[in-house]
Image (cartoon, rainbow, N blue to C red):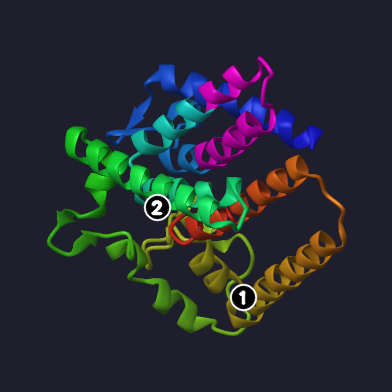
C-alpha cells in the first residue's frame, strides 16, 4: 500500500506539471510525457487512486492534495482528446456510487440511483456547455476513409489481419510492433496498431494470446480466492475495490492503447 501511494503521489505531481506545461502535440495535451496517449493512461490511473486516497483519508489534511490530483488527472485525461480515456472517465463516474457504498439496503440503493441521476445531469450539462475534445473525437471524421469512432481506429487497424495472418500461431515475436515502427520504419504494413490486444495477437499469435488470457483468468481467480479468505476492515475493502477498478479500466483502455502489453 505504501509503494502504491508513493507512486500515486509521484504520478500526481507529474500530472499537475503536465497541466501547466501546455505541451500540445497535434492539438492534444501531451504534458511532460510528450505523448497524449501515454498521458491519458497515467492520468486515468492517477484519477482513480487519487479518488481512493481522498475517500480513505477522511478527516486528514492530505485529502486536499489528492483532491488536487483528482481534478488535474481528470482535466489531463479530457485534454488529451483520448476517446477511450474520456469514455473511461464517464464509466468511472457511474461505477463510483457502487464502489463506495456496498450496503444493500433499500435506502442505500435509492442513494445510488440518485447519484447516477445526478452524474447523468452533470455529464449532459458539461457536454452541452463545454467543448470536450475526447467526446468530439468520438464522432469526428478525419477523412472519408477513416471514421474515428470508439470501436475502431479506422486505417490504423486495416493491416492487423494481414500482419497476423502471415504468422498466426506463434506470431512475429515479442517487441516486433515497436521494432517495425521505430527501427525498420516498415511501410509494407501499418504496424502502429494502437491496441494492446492486437499487438499481442500480432507479436505472439494465437498461442501467446491464449497464454496472456490464461494469465489474467488465473490471476483473477487467485485474487478472488485471496479476498474471500481475507479479513479486511471497511477501509481496506474500499482500497481493494479501487485496485480492482484500476484493473478493469486499464483492460478496457488497452483496447485502443498500446501500453498494457
Q: Is residue 90 visible?
A: no
Mark 2–mark 1 contact, CB under 8 Å?
Answer: no
Q: Is residue 197 above or below residue 131?
A: below
Mark 1 element type = helix
Question: Residue 190 appears at what percent x and percent y?
Answer: 37, 63
Q: Is residue 148 above or below residue 92?
A: below
- Image quarter of the C terminus: bottom right
Q: Residue at x 67, y 49 (%)?
A: 243
Q: What range of the chain is rendered magenta?
A: 42-69
Question: Residue 252 appears at what percent x and percent y?
Answer: 50, 59
Question: Residue 246 appears at what percent x and percent y?
Answer: 60, 50
Q: Is residue 31 visible?
A: yes
Label 2 sits on residue = 84
Label 1 sits on residue = 209
| Relative depth, front residue between 261 and 183 | 261
| Relative depth, front residue between 181 and 34 | 34
The total of numbered circles placed on residues is 2
Is 67 within the magenta? Answer: yes
| Relative depth, front residue between 83 and 157 | 83
Amino acid at each position: 500500500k505504501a509503494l502504491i501511494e508513493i507512486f500515486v503521489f509521484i504520478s500526481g505531481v507529474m500530472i499537475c506539471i503536465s497541466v501547466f506545461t501546455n505541451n500540445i502535440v497535434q492539438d492534444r495535451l501531451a504534458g511532460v510525457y510528450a505523448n497524449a496517449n501515454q498521458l491519458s493512461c497515467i492520468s486515468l490511473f492517477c484519477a482513480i487512486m487519487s479518488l481512493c486516497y481522498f475517500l480513505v483519508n477522511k478527516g486528514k489534511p492530505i485529502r486536499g492534495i489528492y483532491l488536487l490530483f483528482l481534478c488535474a488527472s481528470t482535466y489531463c485525461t479530457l485534454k488529451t482528446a483520448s476517446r477511450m480515456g474520456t469514455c473511461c472517465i464517464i464509466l468511472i463516474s457511474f461505477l463510483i456510487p457502487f464502489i463506495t457504498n456496498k450496503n444493500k439496503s433499500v435506502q442505500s440503493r435509492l442513494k445510488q440511483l440518485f447519484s447516477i441521476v445526478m452524474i447523468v445531469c452533470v455529464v449532459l450539462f458539461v457536454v452541452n456547455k463545454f467543448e470536450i475534445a475526447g467526446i468530439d473525437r468520438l464522432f469526428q471524421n478525419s477523412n472519408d476513409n477513416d471514421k474515428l469512432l470508439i470501436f475502431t481506429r479506422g486505417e490504423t487497424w486495416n493491416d492487423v489481419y494481414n500482419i497476423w495472418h502471415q504468422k498466426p500461431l506463434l506470431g512475429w515475436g515479442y517487441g516486433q510492433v515497436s521494432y517495425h515502427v521505430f527501427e525498420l520504419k516498415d511501410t509494407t504494413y501499418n504496424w502502429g496498431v494502437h491496441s494492446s490486444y492486437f499487438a499481442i495477437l500480432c507479436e505472439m499469435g494465437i498461442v501467446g494470446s491464449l497464454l496472456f488470457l490464461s494469465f489474467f483468468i488465473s490471476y483473477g481467480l487467485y485474487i478472488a480466492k485471496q479476498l474471500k479468505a481475507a479479513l479486511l476492515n471497511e477501509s481496506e475493502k474500499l482500497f481493494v475495490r479501487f485496485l480492482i477498478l484500476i484493473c478493469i479500466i486499464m483492460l478496457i483502455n488497452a483496447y485502443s492503447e498500446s501500453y498494457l502489453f
